[in-house]
Every structure is written in structure tokens, then in C-alpha cells.
Image: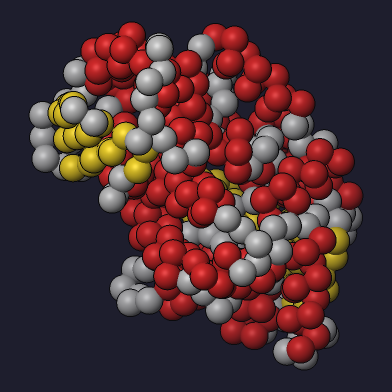
Amino acid sequence: MDPFAPLARQFCTATLKKCADGKLVINEPGRKHEFGLSEHPSANMQLHASRFWRRAVLGGDIGFAESYIDGDWSSNDLSAVVEFFARNIKHLGAKPSAHPLRSMAHRGLHAWRDNSRRGSRSNIMAHYDLGNEFYEIWLDPSMTYSSACYDGADNLSLAQARKYKNLTDIMALERDKHVLEVGCGWGGFAKFAATEIGAKVTAITISPSQFEFAARRIQEEGLGEKIDLRLIDYRDLDGTYDAVASIEMFEAVGERYWPVYFSSLQDRLKPGGRAGLQIITIRDEFFSSYRKSVDFIQRHVFPGGMLPSISSLKSEVERAGLSWHDNKGFGLDYARTLAEWRVVFNQRWDEVAKLGFDERFQRFWNYYLSYCEGGFRAGNIDVHQIGLQKV
């Protein structure tokens, strides 16, 4: 028994009694705690170690996540647990916070993981260079690791293609036009633009493993004349293009470099050229507190990352001299995308385990995917396709 558990439990339960949206049941040996005044979302937690309470109090949302990853608690619907807390932020305060010294340490580490050219390479490798085979197991055949846009599509592969089509429409991309893709991943959009639109594509990444995979894919499918793949930072690129695409890359830029990013878009676009961006955002009212803290994603998943709000994006776009002409949010589609990824990830866990990953790694990925899904379902975060134009 953790000697600090009784006091920490008392503090946590008193705080959780403020929650009104949804229902949360926490079961521990000999005790049952119920919180919330409505039925949706309905979430449950089963505690396996009394140290959970102390870790939640001292570590805030990061301690809460780490205690799940370490096996201190479990749930049969992890995304519902996250959604419950996300919907009750207004009752819990702007953001469940850690002990001040821990918060200071997290902020210091986050600042140290700055997205300079060298830092960006290191940060991107921390997540994407787990091995191409790992991502091949649970992503759809296009190897697309960003939100799909269902909009009537009945499966993930079709929804990913629809997302790509929507972006090409935003950019008014046509046959033989030249599009730059900033942050090309494993080459899904580049292939779509080249084969479905007939565009010429310059695709860039700073991930060696993604570059290797995309290069092989381009060669095998005979797309070398259509796609120019480069291992280069967006800040080191020159030339101008008819259009620029960037799909969920902006989140990894870091707030310090937002002006540089939009200035680069301005420089790379020809006069009248359009950019089609897909960006995850945080609600305007949470942005101020969010930017002063470090969350689970920034600490453990995407070092150096930072979500913008729509208002902060518009300010940066205006400062760069670009014109904003399209904006569509589809956050619930991202929740569905994440849920589909998580189902396949767990269905094919035996294949993942053969790559050398253990059950703690499985809990980590289940928490990460559920954490994001719950945030989108609650509406605290959203994903947008945005159209910009150089005027």
C-alpha cells in the first residue's frame, strides 16, 4: 500500500466530484467511486496499484498516462476515460496540472527539444523511425498516418483517398502542375497527386526511414519521372511551385518556428499559387494555458510539437502576407480514424510483438491513440483542411 495513497485519493476524489459531464466509475479493491451527472461518455477504470493516486496528483495528466502505461490501472474503453476528462476540463481547471517542480522539469525538457534543423531531425526520428514494418502492420495500404475524411466513404482506404482529393481541390491542382509536399511521410499523397491528378510532385521529408520507404515505393511503381523525393528540411529548400501541400506536419514545427514556416510557404509559392494544409488545432479558449504547459503528447510522443488554435493560425497567415480562403473542420473523422487504427493495431499485436515490442509498448500505443480519439470526440482538439493563396 502506497503510504501517500489515502491523502492523494482524498484530493483526487474531491476534485472529481466537480465533474458534471458524463459518468466515471473507478473501482479499486474494497472501494468504488462514481463521478459525473450524465450518461455520456460512460467510462470506467480498474485500479491495480494504490500508487495511482499519488502519481495522478504529482504528475497531472502525464502522471495519469504513465500510470496506465505502467499497468497501475486499466479500462475496457480507454478513449471514453480520456473523453470524460476532456469534457470536464472546465470543472477541473484549464488543464489537470502536475506538481510545480515536475511541470517546470517537463517545460525545460520540452524547450530543450527545440525544432532547430538538428532538433527537428532528432524529434522526428523519435516517433517515425520505429521501423517501417511496424507502421505497415496497422496503417492502411496507402501508409497514410493522418486523419481520413470519410464524408460518405465506408472504409479507411477510401476515406484517405477522399482526404487527398479534397486537398488537391483546395489547391486547384491540375495535370502537369508542380506541387511541393512539405512532410511527405511514406509517400501516400505524392503517389495520389502523381497518379490520380497527373501532377508533378516534389516531396520532402527529414525522416530517413520514411525517405527509404517512399524511394523504394516510387521506384517499384515507376513514378520516378513524376515524383522528386528529397531528404531535406523545408527551411533549406529553394525554387517556386504552383501549389504546396502539407499534411499534419505543422504540428511538429514548434511555435518558435511558425513565422519561418509560413514565410517559407510564401517564398515557395508562385504568384497566385495555393497551399492546401491539414492541421490539428486546439480550441481557442484552451490555447493560452496549453502553450504554457507540456502534455502527454509533447512529453512522450512528439517531442518539440505544438498545436495551434485557429486564431493563432490566422494571425501567422496574415503576418506572412498570405490569403486565407478555405477552412473545413472534421474532428470526428479523426476520432474514427484513430479508432480504426487502434482496432487493427490490437488485432495484429502478435505481428507487432515479433518486431521486439513488449506489452508496455502496447499499452503506450493504446493510450496514445485513445488519448487523441477522446480529445477529438470531446471537441477540445479538431483537424482542419485550410486553403491559403499567395496574392
Residue visible at 23% across and 40% down?
Answer: 44
Q: Is residue 231 left or right of residue 1?
A: right
Residue 35: quadrant of the picture: top left
Front residue of 189 and 73: 73
- Classify 297 as above or below 36: below
Front residue of 109 and 319: 109
What is the residue that sits farthest to the front in this orientation?
1
Q: Is residue 372 left or right of residue 201?
A: left
**Residue 161, image x, y percentages:** 50, 75
Residue 292: quadrant of the picture: top right
How many numbered circles does the render carry? Answer: 0
- Classify 343 as above or below 387: below
Front residue of 377 and 26: 26
Residue visible at 52% across and 53% down?
Answer: 359
- Classify 239 as above or below 363: below
**Residue 162, image x, y percentages:** 46, 73
Residue 218 visible in rendering: yes
Point out the image quarter for the N terminus: top left
Residue visible at 48% across and 59% down?
Answer: 147
Front residue of 259 and 255: 255
Residue 175 visible in rendering: no
**Residue 77, image x, y percentages:** 29, 49
Q: How is the image coloured?
A: secondary structure
Q: Is residue 202 left or right of residue 186?
A: right
Q: Is residue 361 left or right of residue 31?
A: right
Residue visible at 81% across and 70% down?
Answer: 212
